[in-house]
Image (tube, rainbow, N blue to C red):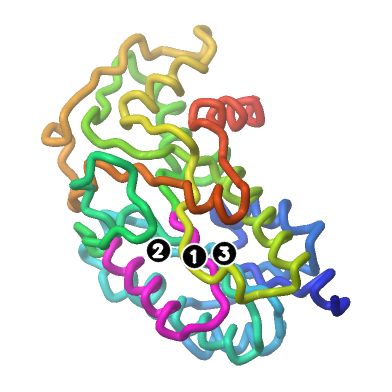
């Protein structure tokens, strides 16, 4: 195996995001990691993207950056599509030119949530809003380039830093006696740390086999089990020590009582059978994952 594939150059885009921040740590033993984010690289500018790839000349490109403001995307569709739709295609083109592997993250929001059993990779997408459409456009752009790529489809990402459901509920539980949380939307709460660790384990397998094309494709990457937003919130509140918790009740409400600019899929649980079969990986149950993240915050 060439030395470069033992310790490759890895270009990580999105170093300050939830997943990117964790990847900086899990990728460190695998290669020489070059980490960038906005404004160093501007994902709305094709020249900026191409310049960074040319300068780093990586063997691995990991795109952990995205436009994730789901509701704002309805009025900022141009920006959402540039970052989520066009930029991944450019990265795929540049990766193919230099023989690199592109790792990219997709979302459960490409589905409409009409299923009642976990979604598999082959299910037909039908996004409900601009955010989902923009992410789907990026997935399709990568596939059309037909270079070496891994697309990991994520669900309900949270972590110990950034802006996410866990941190929001923890804050609100210290301020309010009662929280009202949607009960009729279901997904797989998945920690950014677990996503980063799984990504690094997959990458290690690919590098050890020295075959960047063997595993090309899309894989669901999510915690085991499922929960509603209400149950997720209840589990978070239960972890807060009584002396730091003002909240005494988490009331379940229908989505109709919490209107948003974008309709969310009512059911976006992801099957990870393919990930288990191909890579031998299974993320812990979401409740166990939550406890691990909580311990890291205390």
Q: Which mark is residue 159?
A: none
Is 151 in the magenta?
yes
Q: Residue at x 49, y 65 (%)?
A: 151
Q: Tell me the tag on residue 14.
A: 3
Q: Position of residue 65 (x, y in %)?
A: 51, 64
Q: Which residue is mark 1?
A: 151
Residue 67's label in the rendered image is 2
When asked about the image quadrant of residue 87, the answer is bottom left
Q: Residues within 10 Å of mark 1 (few under 14, many from 20)?
A: many
- CA–CA distance between discs 1 and 2? 16 Å
Look at discs 3 and 1 and give the one toward the viewer: 1
Give the residues in magenta: 131-153
Classify residue 132 as left or right of residue 106: left
Q: Position of residue 126 (x, y in %)?
A: 22, 61
What whole-number distance in Å separates the C-alpha atoms at marks 3 and 1? 16 Å
Closer to viewer: mark 1 or mark 2: 1
Query: Relative to residue 63, is residue 225 depicted above or below?
Result: above
Among numbered discs 3 and 1, the one appearing first in the sequence: 3
């Amino acid at each position: 195996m060439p030395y470069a594939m033992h310790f490759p150059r890895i270009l990580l885009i999105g170093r300050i995001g939830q997943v990117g921040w964790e990847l900086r740590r899990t990728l460190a033993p695998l290669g020489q990691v070059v980490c960038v984010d906005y404004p160093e690289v501007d994902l709305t500018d094709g020249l900026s993207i191409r310049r960074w790839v040319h300068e780093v000349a990586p063997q691995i490109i990991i795109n952990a950056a995205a436009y994730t403001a789901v509701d704002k995307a309805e009025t900022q569709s141009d920006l959402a599509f540039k970052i989520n739709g066009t930029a991944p295609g450019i990265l795929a083109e540049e990766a193919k030119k230099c023989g690199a592997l592109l790792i990219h993250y997709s979302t459960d929001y490409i589905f409409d949530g009409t299923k009642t059993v976990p979604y598999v990779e082959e299910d037909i997408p039908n996004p409900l809003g601009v955010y989902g459409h923009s992410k789907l456009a990026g997935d399709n752009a990568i596939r059309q380039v037909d270079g070496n790529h891994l697309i990991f489809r994520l669900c309900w990402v949270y972590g110990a830093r950034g802006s996410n459901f866990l941190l929001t509920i923890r804050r609100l539980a210290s301020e309010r006696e009662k929280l009202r949380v949607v009960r009729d939307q279901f997904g797989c709460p998945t920690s950014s740390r677990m996503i980063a660790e799984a990504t690094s384990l997959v990458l290690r397998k690919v590098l050890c086999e020295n075959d960047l094309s063997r595993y090309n494709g899309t894989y669901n990457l999510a915690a085991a089990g499922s929960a509603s937003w209400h149950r997720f919130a209840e589990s978070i509140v239960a972890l807060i020590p009584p002396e730091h918790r003002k909240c005494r009740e988490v009331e379940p409400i229908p989505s109709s009582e919490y209107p948003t600019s974008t309709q969310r899929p009512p059911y976006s649980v992801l099957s990870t059978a393919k990930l288990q079969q191909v890579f031998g990986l299974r993320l812990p149950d979401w409740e166990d994952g939550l406890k691990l993240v909580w311990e890291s915050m205390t």
